[in-house]
Image: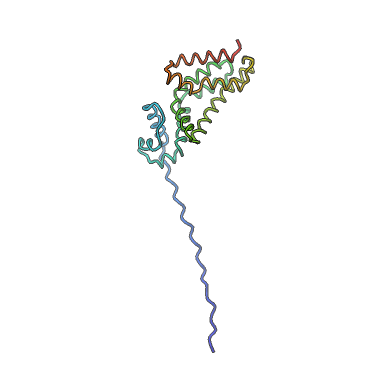
Amino acid sequence: MSTPRRPPVHKARSPAKAPAAAAAPPAAPAGTRERVLQAALALIGERGHANFSLVELAAETGLSRQTLYLLFGTRAGLLMALVDHLDANSSGPARLTSLRVQGTRQFETYVRAWFDYLPVVLPVARALAAAGATGDEDARAAWQSRLAKLHHGFTQMARALQAEGRLRPGWTVAQAADWTLALTHVDLWQHLVVEAGWKPADHVERVVATLRQTLLKD
């Protein structure tokens, strides 16, 4: 008589081990971001423009490209960080904010204050605009954001002019803000002052006079 066979024993399989998570890149040492921004500003000062890559900036600072991408993400991110850095370390933005609060009687002073600050941000602003025009969507968005911020300030000033009855008839607040932005735009400064050789003071006086004659009641 044959011995009955025992049913096969199936050993439970051990659960598969999950793949180890990739190690997060090490954080940049404290002060690295500031050092990179200062190096970028130095390059702009030497060259007169901001047409350099993150690779060039990495070589200039002795840092890896990975570190720069970790800090800023993209070249547009670096340029926006530069503008924010300039804003934070200049009296220009605070001066503009103060004048907006004071209202309409400061309209011309507000425009002059913007012109005082414009040369500080011009190289970075031009770099953002140029990158955006060549298909860099991040740069384009960053540049549009800066223009929107400036336009918002002019809108506030135009609205205050209208409220006090000093805005010339035929102008809406939106039109007045658009007109002011057009005449104070960095592109017009670049064309007339940088390329055509106008004296900055002459440019400012002509723009202020034009705004006074076209927007303000006599």
**In the picture, residue 165 is in which quadrant?**
top right
Q: Is residue 180 above or below residue 21?
A: above
**Quarter of the picture holding the N terminus:** bottom right
| Image quadrant containing the C terminus | top right
Q: Position of residue 45 (x, y in %)?
A: 38, 26
Residue 60 rendering spot, x and y as whole percentages: 35, 35
Left or right, 192 with respect to 180, comes to: left
Give how far across and how far down residue 155 sits, in percent: 59, 23
Q: Nearer the viewer, residue 17 or 45?
A: 45
Q: Is residue 38 above or below residue 2?
A: above
Q: Is residue 13 above or below residue 202?
A: below
Q: Residue at x 45, y 34 (%)?
A: 78
Visual colour scheme = rainbow
Foreground pick, 119 / 99: 119
Q: x and y percent of residue 210 in the render?
A: 54, 14
Q: How many marks?
A: 0
What residue is rendered at 53% in x and 87% in y? 2
Taking the view exactly as shown, the residue that stands out farthest to the top is 218
* Front-lying residue, 175 or 61: 175
